[in-house]
Image (cartoon, rainbow, N blue to C red):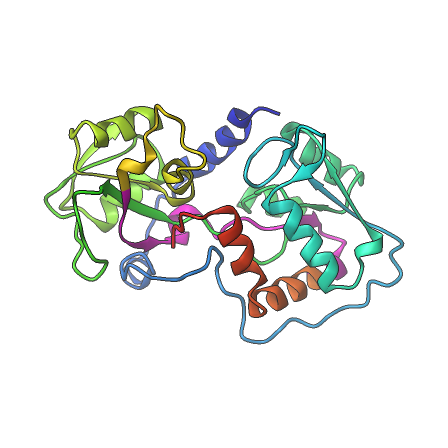
C-alpha cells in the first residue's frame, strides 16, 4: 500500500467535522485551554479495567498495514517495524501471551475485510472509530490521539501562556476539520486556506502567513531533521502555543478494532493499554518514534 492511500483515509476523516458544536463542549474542550498533555493518547479511566481470561485462545492474530511510517513499514530485509509493531509486542508481553501472538501486514484496502471475514482478530493500523465502523466493529480505548497545533518560523518566539493567533495570518488546509476547528476556536485569526500541505508549509517559509495550523503529528514528522527532506526544510520552524486535542472535531484517536463478539479481547487490550500507560511504556514508544514531540 502506498502512503497516499492511508493519508487519503485520514484526510477523509479530518473532513468529517460535526455540523453541531455544543457550547459546553466548546468552552470545556481541552483545545481552548491549550492543554499541555505530554502524551499522545487520551487518558483512560482511573480504574484499571478487569483482566479477562483469554487462556482458551490458542493464538491471537494481529493485523497492521504495510507502509505508513513511522507506525508500520517493512525494512529492506522484509521485517515489520514501527510504532504499531512495538505496541502489539508490548500488549502481548503485558498480557503474557507473547508466544501466542501472530503479527501480519497487508495493504490498507485489505484490512477491514480481513477482520470482518475472521482472517484476523485485531487491527492495529491507525484506525479512527466513527459511527459507520461502530455499527459492525468494536474498539478499544484510544492509544494515540492526533491533536492540532500551530507552527511558526523559529524567529517568532512565543510561550504557550502568552501565545495567541488573534489578528495573525494563519494558513490551514482547506475544507478540513482543522479549518473548521480554527474558525470556531479562533474567529479573530485571519485564515488563509491552502489546497495541499506542501503549499501550506511553503506559505509559512515564504512569509505569506505568520502561522500554520494542522495535524500535529504530520507537522512533527516534517520538522524532524532525521526525516525531513532537503526541500521541506523542516528545521526552519517550531511549534508555538499548546496542543488542541479537540475530539469533537478530530475524533478520539487511533484505537484497536475488533469484531463485536470478541469482547474478551477488547477488555484484555484495554487492560493492557491502561497498564502500559501507567508504566510509562506508551510514553517511551511516543518518544522513540516522534523525537519532535507534538504535545
Q: Is residue 144 visible?
A: no
Residue 44, how many percent across, how many down? Answer: 53, 66
Image point (74%, 35%), residue name: 114
What percent of the width, then of the height, locates residue 20? Answer: 34, 48
Residue 193 position within the rendered picture, expressed as x and y whole percent measured from the top left: 24, 30
Camera-nearest residue between 103 and 75? 75
Query: Is residue 258 in the magenta section?
Result: yes
User: In percent of the image, x 67 and y 28: which residue is there?
Assistant: 76
Residue 137 within the magenta-colored segment of the rendering: no
- Left or right: residue 23 versus residue 18 is left
Seen in the image, is 260 located left or right of residue 26?
right
Q: Quadrant of the N terminus?
A: top right
**The C terminus - image quarter:** bottom left
Residue drawn at x 38%, y 45% as measured from the top left: 216
* Residue 253 seen in this snapshot: yes
All told, the count of numbered labels is: 0
Is residue 65 rendered to the left or right of residue 5?
right
Q: Among all residues in the image, which is located at the extreme bottom?
A: 47
Residue 271 vs 133, above or below: the answer is: below
In this view, which residue lies farthest toward the left?
A: 167
Percent of width and height locating residue 274: 60, 66
Asked if residue 229 lies left or right of residue 284, the reply is: left
The quarter holding residue 151 reads top left
Determine the residue positioned at 31% across, 37% down.
235
- Specify start and end residues of the magenta stretch as a single range: 238-266
- Quadrant for residue 136, please give it: top right
Amino acid at each position: 500500500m502506498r502512503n497516499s492511500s492511508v493519508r487519503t483515509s485520514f484526510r477523509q476523516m479530518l473532513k468529517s467535522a460535526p455540523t453541531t458544536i455544543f457550547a459546553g463542549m466548546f468552552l470545556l474542550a481541552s483545545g481552548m485551554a491549550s492543554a499541555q498533555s505530554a502524551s499522545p493518547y487520551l487518558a483512560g479511566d482511573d480504574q484499571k479495567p478487569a483482566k479477562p481470561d483469554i487462556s482458551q485462545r490458542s493464538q491471537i492474530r494481529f493485523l497492521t498495514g504495510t507502509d505508513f511510517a513511522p507506525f508500520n513499514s517493512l525494512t529492506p530485509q522484509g521485517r515489520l517495524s514501527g510504532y504499531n509493531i512495538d505496541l502489539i509486542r508490548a500488549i502481548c508481553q503485558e498480557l503474557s501471551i507473547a508466544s501466542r501472538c501472530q503479527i501480519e501486514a497487508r495493504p490498507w484496502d485489505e484490512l477491514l475485510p480481513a477482520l470482518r471475514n475472521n482472517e484476523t482478530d485485531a487491527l492495529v493500523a491507525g484506525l479512527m472509530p466513527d459511527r459507520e465502523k461502530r455499527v459492525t466493529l468494536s474498539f478499544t480505548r484510544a492509544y494515540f490521539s492526533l491533536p492540532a497545533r500551530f507552527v511558526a518560523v523559529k524567529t517568532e518566539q512565543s510561550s504557550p501562556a502568552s501565545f495567541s493567533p488573534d489578528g495573525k495570518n494563519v494558513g490551514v488546509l482547506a475544507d478540513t476539520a482543522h479549518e473548521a476547528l480554527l474558525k470556531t476556536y479562533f474567529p479573530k485569526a485571519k485564515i488563509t486556506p491552502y489546497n495541499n500541505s506542501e503549499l501550506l508549509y511553503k506559505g509559512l517559509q515564504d512569509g505569506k502567513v505568520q502561522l500554520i495550523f494542522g495535524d500535529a503529528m504530520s507537522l512533527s514528522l516534517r520538522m524532524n531533521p532525521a526525516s525531513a527532506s532537503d526541500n521541506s526544510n523542516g528545521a526552519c520552524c517550531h511549534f508555538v502555543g499548546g496542543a488542541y486535542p479537540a475530539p469533537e472535531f478530530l475524533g478520539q484517536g487511533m484505537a484497536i478494532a475488533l469484531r463485536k463478539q470478541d469482547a474478551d479481547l477488547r477488555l484484555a487490550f484495554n487492560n493492557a493499554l491502561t497498564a502500559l500507560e501507567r508504566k510509562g511504556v506508551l510514553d517511551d514508544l511516543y518518544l522513540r518514534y516522534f523525537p519532535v514531540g507534538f504535545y
